Image: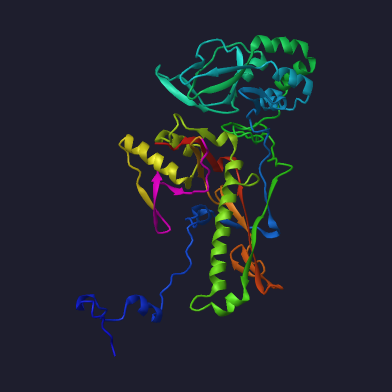
Amino acid sequence: MTVTDPGLGVEDQQLSLSTAAARNLATTTKSAPQMQGISPRWLLRMLPWVETKGGAFRVNRRLSYAVGDGRVTFTSVGSEVRVVPQELCEFPLLRGFDDEAALTALANRFEQREYEPGDVIAERGDPADSIVVIAHGKVTKTGRGEYGDEVALGTIADGEHFGDNEILAGVEGTWEFTARALTPTTVVVLSRATFNQLNGQIEPLREHIAQQLASPAGAANKHGEAEIRLASGHDGEPVLPGTFVDYELRPREYELSVAQTILRVHTRVADLYSQPMDQVEHQLRLTIEALRERQEFELVNNKEFGLLANADLKQRVSTGSGPVTPDDMDELISRRRNTRLILAHPKAIAAFGRQLSARGLYAPTVEVEGKQLQSWRGIPIAPCDKIPVNKNGTTSILAMRLGEEKQGVVGLRQTGIPDEYEPGLNVRFMGIDEHAMLKYLVSTYYSAAVLVPDALGVLENVEIGL
């Protein structure tokens, strides 16, 4: 029997079962657990993976005479910067010089100078009378082309230097380029007169430079590799040169790194709440996603094997003006043959798109694994949010040649490991503890190797601001 409130009109009375009450009897349709931290992980998808038995990968190369990274390091106290004395051995003529007292005396004689954007640091045609080392900032070098017009010769940044060969070798001459500050720039300078004074007082320094000039490290090609002597274009029966290909005595070895975690699931949850979705399966799926994200982060940023840290200094270039332009991208990819992948932060890709629009240009898309990616010169530009963006709003862009057969960049992993769940990743049951917790050890093993230096290049100081 239905009781009707006499104070309510017919239009105010409930005439059917409410949806709120009906929902108690309905079956809820649920989604699988979602995770915002999943990214496309293009680096993991595009890297050719090399099977690494024994957990280590040795990169054998031809013997190279290159020493050090070529960049000078500084210390700073407030606004004052000082050259680390041992870092002066990055100058080619001082390599191998180990007299700390002499290096300290030399480092103490460098003078600090500040320049604003547009200021000239060295003028083409003026006497080359000093060693200039960039402590902080960016400097552009320009010269004269064949027909007298001004041409850009490149950009140099922190730790790079010029004038050292002329001053240390005692060669008189003039600057062949104009060096101009692009940003607020701090440099340290050692004049020719100051060096000559020190050189006359420090006999070991004088003897070392004389020895370097008389007997350089060895004949090498433009890449610093030991020369292979050949003869070509000859007539008759000359004596042909004998030769051999020398190898590095201590080739670099990459050991597989690991990312691990212990997944815990209470037995009560696994037993009672695994319908219609298996709780252990979805806990494991999201844990693996997190491990794969960490794996890509390490492949980019790890100090031992990460791509940013292992790019050769000769393969690092700075943007010409700040934002990444088509000219900068051309400079980056021109430094290697067969570039197959460009990796950039999404904000850097957006900044590049703005520069293209400003010039009235359009970068076509290319299809990669069924997805459309922006490209430049036919090379796909894949987004990677693991590339860091610095506090000053700058980031880096990587360009790489891929594959072992191309002497490129390769990923390293070992498959066939015990309890393998995915290639290079295993899930091992660790039992049930006293708290009734199921425990699974989830591990992924990985690394990356740059087979030859020019396989990987980095465009640095890329500004992403509007």
Q: Tell me the quarter of the picture where residue 208 sits.
A: top right
Q: Read off the magenta span.
A: 367-391
Q: Residue furthest left?
A: 10
In the rendering, at what x and y percent does residue 27 appear? 40, 79
Q: Nearer the viewer, residue 404 or 333?
A: 333
**Nearer to the camera, 406 or 375:** 375
Quadrant hosting residue 227:
top right
The answer to which of 287 and 141 lies nearer the viewer is 287
Residue plotted at (67% across, 30% down):
219
Q: Nearer the viewer, residue 223 or 317?
A: 317
Name, please, the residue furthest toward the front.
7
Q: Is residue 377 magenta?
A: yes
Q: Is residue 197 left or right of residue 401?
A: right
**Position of 260 relative to 181 (above/below):** below
Q: Is residue 290 left or right of residue 242?
A: left
Residue found at x 25% / y 78%: 13
Q: Is residue 260 left or right of residue 180?
A: right
Q: Position of residue 271 (x, y in %)?
A: 58, 79
Across and down, in percent, residue 426 comes to 63, 66
Residue 378 within the magenta-colored segment of the rendering: yes
Q: As displayed, is residue 206 above or below residue 97?
A: above
Residue 404 makes an appearance in the image = no
Q: Quadrant of residue 25?
A: bottom left
User: Where is residue 31 drawn, in percent x and y?
Assistant: 44, 70
| Above or below, comparing residue 70 to residue 122 in the picture | below
Q: Looking at the image, is 337 positioned above or below residue 404? A: above
Quadrant in which the N terminus appears: bottom left
Q: Which residue is drawn at the image coordinates 55% and 36% (left, top)?
A: 315
